[in-house]
Image (tube, coloured by chain):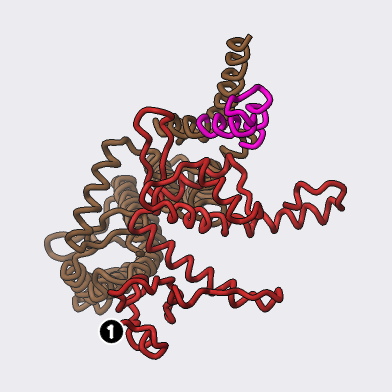
Chain colours: A red, B brown
């Protein structure tokens, strides 16, 4: 973001932009997974991923377009996402999460949510984790939807959730 | 006019994609997959340009902007090269192959030096100390040179994002995948490099072998035979060899007891074995240079010694034994390297 600002002290600009890139690199991966997760049924093509990312993050998280495809390839190589090419027409490549990718994403989403909640006070911001819709595993921070009625164990670490859910009055009988 | 414009627009995209293809790492260019990558980029540019033009009809200007947004071909290629987990300039994925190649090169250099030593010993053109000096200098220079070359090659390959499987044929890759799937189903161990691993030692064999070595070592060390018929220097050397065999036997038994676990402990033991085996070399060199102490008896158990005219043959035989001892250490080096893949 600071890269586009003209007239700054070059040393400050270089340093700030380098740290900004480092932060963005880690966040980009999880945000891309999140956008793909939202289009779980139909899949989503590369261009739309970027558009959704920009719009949903209010143009704060901007991934350089050329770097998106190497990142998608890496995620596919790691078994987190799968792709299929459109038959006929524009022959666009559609991406969707694999079962393993979904598991990894839920864990990372939980961990990241808890992390930003924890560090929020450092920057004087409040983070609402929407605990009425999600439950975060006390053992590993995995993000679990409360709408899942079969919920007994954390699918990331195997922790027995029943007691915690009962204590918080979240267990559905 | 519109047709000319379309040709220009298509040429701009083609030229950009050509530059991207050129910048991509070689391992990716060798795979058909790179066509898919270029197709994705092309599709993206058209879509972006359509949007930027405002009327769904890409113009030269909108294509130029879309390409600009896509970034430099080198930046895109750099992302594809960002592959693997870094481990001291060489990626974790390339590390086992690096160690393997380095070990093979070291073993070959070591073998060639030993061969040179044998030839020198047999021809007798140089004296003992010159031979040892030549051996040490040769090994040192060879190892240093090969280490530098191999390391530079692997650093470059890591920077380019190569993985060991990029050097395998598709057929071998498929076979490897099938083996791993089968092993996963059978619950067999799979190494960090994703390969199926077999048990690395036969514990009973190691224990029996170690026991035999200890028995012979004890005989040599205790010397339960009439010592008077041997030269004292020879008996002293025999004690030295006995001690070496006992130590070697104990180390083999330890490996047998540890069994197919703790590969790192086996690696340490092999390291000790190399030192123990090489400890025999100075004793053999002393034996080689003193043919007169080597026992050779007449039928009446009278020490008659090796005839002087056979001294050269005797020295040659001992030199071969020295070479064999040194070569057996290569086996230990090989096992240390091989055990690396069992650390999972």
Secondary structure of the residue carrying numbered label 1? loop
Identify which residue, B301 or B81, lies in the foreground: B81
Q: Where residue B290 sits in the image (x, y, percent)?
A: 37, 58
Corner quadrant of residue B201 = bottom left
Q: Is residue B115 visible?
A: yes
* Furthest residue in direction front, as rendered: B55
* Furthest residue in direction bottom, as rendered: A167
Residue found 68% across the figure and 74% down from its top: A125
In the displayed structure, would residue B210 be above or below residue A53?
A: below
The answer to whether residue B199 is left or right of residue A81 is left
Residue found 30% across the figure and 79% down from its top: A152
Corner quadrant of residue A148 = bottom left
Q: Which secondary structure class fits the magenta region best? A: helix
Q: Where residue A47 sits in the image (x, y, percent)?
A: 52, 40
In the displayed structure, would residue B223 be above or below residue B4?
A: below
Residue found 65% across the figure and 37% down from its top: B69
Q: Chain under label 1?
A: A
- Magenta residue span: B42-70
Q: Where residue A20 sits in the image (x, y, percent)?
A: 69, 57
Q: Is residue B220 visible?
A: no
The answer to whether residue A127 is left or right of residue B284 is right
In the displayed structure, would residue B112 be above or below residue B89?
A: above
Q: Residues within 10 Å of mark 1 (few under 14, many from 20)?
A: few
Q: Which residue is mark 1?
A: A173
Q: Is residue B44 magenta?
A: yes
Q: Is residue B78 magenta?
A: no
Residue found 56% across the figure and 73% down from its top: A115
Quadrant that contains the C terminus of chain A: bottom left
Identify which residue, B55 or B102, lies in the foreground: B55
Q: Where residue A40 sits in the image (x, y, percent)?
A: 38, 53
Identify which residue, B125 or B164, lies in the foreground: B164
């Amino acid at each position: 973001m600071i890269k586009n600002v003209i007239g700054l002290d070059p040393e400050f600009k270089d340093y700030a932009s380098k740290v900004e890139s480092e932060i963005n690199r880690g966040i980009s991966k999880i945000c891309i997974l999140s956008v793909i997760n939202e289009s779980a049924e139909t899949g989503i093509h590369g261009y739309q991923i970027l558009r959704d990312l920009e719009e949903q993050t209010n143009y704060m998280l901007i991934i350089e377009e050329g770097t998106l495809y190497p990142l998608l390839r890496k995620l596919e190589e790691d078994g987190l996402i799968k792709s299929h090419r459109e038959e006929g027409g524009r022959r666009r490549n559609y991406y969707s999460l694999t079962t393993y990718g979904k598991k990894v994403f839920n864990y990372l989403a939980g961990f990241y949510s808890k992390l930003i909640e924890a560090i929020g006070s450092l920057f004087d911001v409040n983070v609402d984790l929407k605990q009425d819709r999600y439950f975060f595993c006390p053992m590993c921070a995995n993000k679990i939807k409360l709408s899942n009625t079969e919920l007994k164990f954390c699918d990331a670490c195997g922790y027995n959730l029943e007691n915690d859910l009962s204590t918080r009055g979240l267990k559905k009988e | 006019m519109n047709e000319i414009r379309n040709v220009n627009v298509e040429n701009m995209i083609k030229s950009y994609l050509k530059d991207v293809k050129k910048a991509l790492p070689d391992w990716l260019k060798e795979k058909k997959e790179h066509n898919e990558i270029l197709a994705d980029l092309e599709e993206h540019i058209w879509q972006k340009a359509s949007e930027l033009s405002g009327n769904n009809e890409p113009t030269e200007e909108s294509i130029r902007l879309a390409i600009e947004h896509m970034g430099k071909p080198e930046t895109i290629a750099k992302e594809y090269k960002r592959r693997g987990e870094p481990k001291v300039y060489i990626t974790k994925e390339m590390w086992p192959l690096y160690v393997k190649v380095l070990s093979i090169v070291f073993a070959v250099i070591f073998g060639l030096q030993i061969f040179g030593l044998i030839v020198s010993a047999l021809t007798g053109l140089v004296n003992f100390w010159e031979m040892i000096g030549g051996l040490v200098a040769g090994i040192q220079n060879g190892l240093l040179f090969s280490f530098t070359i191999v390391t530079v090659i692997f650093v470059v390959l890591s920077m380019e994002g190569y993985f060991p499987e990029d050097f395998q044929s598709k057929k071998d890759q498929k076979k490897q995948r099938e083996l791993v799937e089968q092993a996963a189903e059978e619950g067999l161990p799979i190494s960090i490099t994703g390969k199926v691993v077999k048990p690395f030692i036969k514990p009973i064999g190691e224990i029996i072998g170690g026991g035999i070595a200890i028995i012979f070592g004890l005989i040599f060390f205790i010397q339960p035979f009439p010592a008077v018929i041997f030269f004292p220097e020879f008996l002293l050397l025999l004690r030295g060899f006995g001690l070496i065999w006992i130590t070697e036997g104990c180390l083999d038994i330890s490996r047998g007891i540890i069994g197919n676990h703790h590969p790192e402990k086996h690696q340490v033991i092999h390291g000790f074995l190399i030192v123990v085996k090489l400890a025999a070399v100075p004793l053999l060199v002393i034996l080689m240079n003193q043919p007169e102490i080597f026992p050779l008896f007449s039928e009446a158990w009278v020490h008659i010694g090796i005839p002087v005219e056979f001294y050269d043959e005797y020295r040659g035989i001992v030199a071969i034994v020295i070479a064999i001892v040194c070569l057996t250490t290569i086996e230990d080096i090989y096992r240390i390297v091989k055990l690396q893949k069992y650390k999972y």
